[in-house]
Amino acid sequence: MIPISYYLFLALTLFTLGMVGVMIRRNIIIMLMCVELMLNSVNLLLVAFSKMHHAKNPGTDAGIDGQMMVLFIMVVAAAEVAVGLSIMILFYRKQYNVDVRNLNRLKH
Amino acid sequence: MSTAEILFFVLAGLTVLSALLTISSKSPVHSILFLIVTFFSISAHYILLNAQFLAVVNIIVYGGAIMVLFLFVVMLMNLNKEDAKFSKPFIILVGSLASVIFFVLTAGIFVKSDITVNNQALLYSGDIGLTERLGEVLYSDYVVPFELASILFMAAMIGAVLLSKKKKEEELES
């Protein structure tokens, strides 16, 4: 049994690292990867909380909703990565680089 | 310290180290490989929490499908040319400052609240992470989101195929 605050701080650290990664990188593929890192930190925290609820009522199905939520978050993340990367490929065909500063076509 | 705490700290250190190396390495392929290491260590955390189904699904879906997709895209794009990898130093400074403030504020909330101080997460045991329990609940209580997830996947597949098609008809006409 580990205090839940350990998992909270680990998930908070991973989330902050993902946030910093989105802010400081210019390559849009790396920015998508940092978004995936943020999603995974939230997944870890949800599973930890589901085990916390299960620890309070041990015989029942008390925490299973958290793990179901994690499954559906993975589903949505996979679909989002597929569509996002195909949009990036389309963008690369015009510009031949993936710098995020060039994603301002709607401005012109 | 008990075995559980030692295991937790070793895995947590590995996760945070590989996440740091992900966001700060210059080559995109190295970033992808470090992110795969991060996903594997998060799966090890799931196994520690006895969420067996999610650990395996995490490795298969994230490490085996999503990261491989990223690797293929990066290799097709030939991204090791000399463009700017990081933003300007001012933006790095402001971003890091904002993230540190976010971390400190949220950690302050966690330290004071009642839930985090008194509760523990159950390790090594518990039926809810096993595939049988998750399967029963998925097909009984969560069957509507399950079917909607299949529609979502169909939309994503159709979208990905349509977006990547080259338009040969316009080139032939012009």
Image: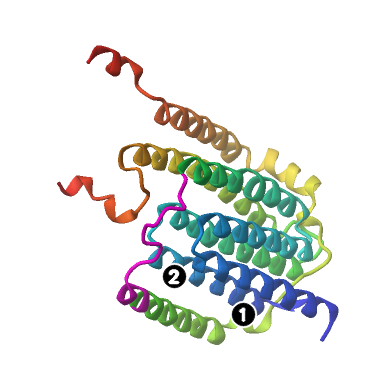
Of residues B42 and B90, the one drawn nearer to the viewer in this rendering: B90
Query: For the point 46% across and 32% down, which residue is it?
Result: B160
Of residues B107 and B91, the one drawn nearer to the viewer in this rendering: B91
Magenta stretch containing residue A12, yes or no? no
Helix or strand or loop: what does disc 2 sit on? helix
- Indicate whether B24 appears above or below B145: below
**Residue type for callout 1:** Thr
- Indicate whether B165 appears above or below A54: above
Q: Main SS type for the magenta part? A: loop
The residue that disc 1 covers is: B116
| Crowd rating for badge 2 (residues with CA inside 10 Å; few <14, some 14–19, many 20+) | many
Query: For the point 77% across and 70% down, which residue is it?
Result: B122
Q: Which residues are magenta?
A: B78-93
**Image x and y of residue B46, in percent:** 73, 61
Mark 1 and mark 2: Cα distance apart in space? 25 Å
**Residue type for callout 2:** Val
User: For the N terminus of chain A, which image quadrant?
Assistant: bottom right
- Indicate whether A64 appears above or below A5: above
Q: How is the image coloured?
A: rainbow
Residue furthest left in the image: A108
Q: Chain of mark 1?
A: B
Tag shown at residue A28: none
Residue B99 lies left or right of residue B55; in this view the side is left
**Image x and y of residue A6, in percent:** 66, 78
Magenta stretch containing residue B86, yes or no? yes
Query: For the point 45% across and 50% down, which residue is it?
Result: B79
Residue A32 lies left or right of residue B19; in this view the side is left
Helix or strand or loop: what does disc 1 sit on? helix
Query: For the point 40% across and 31% down, which residue is it?
Result: B163
The residue that disc 2 covers is: A20
Say if labels 1 and 2 share a chain.
no
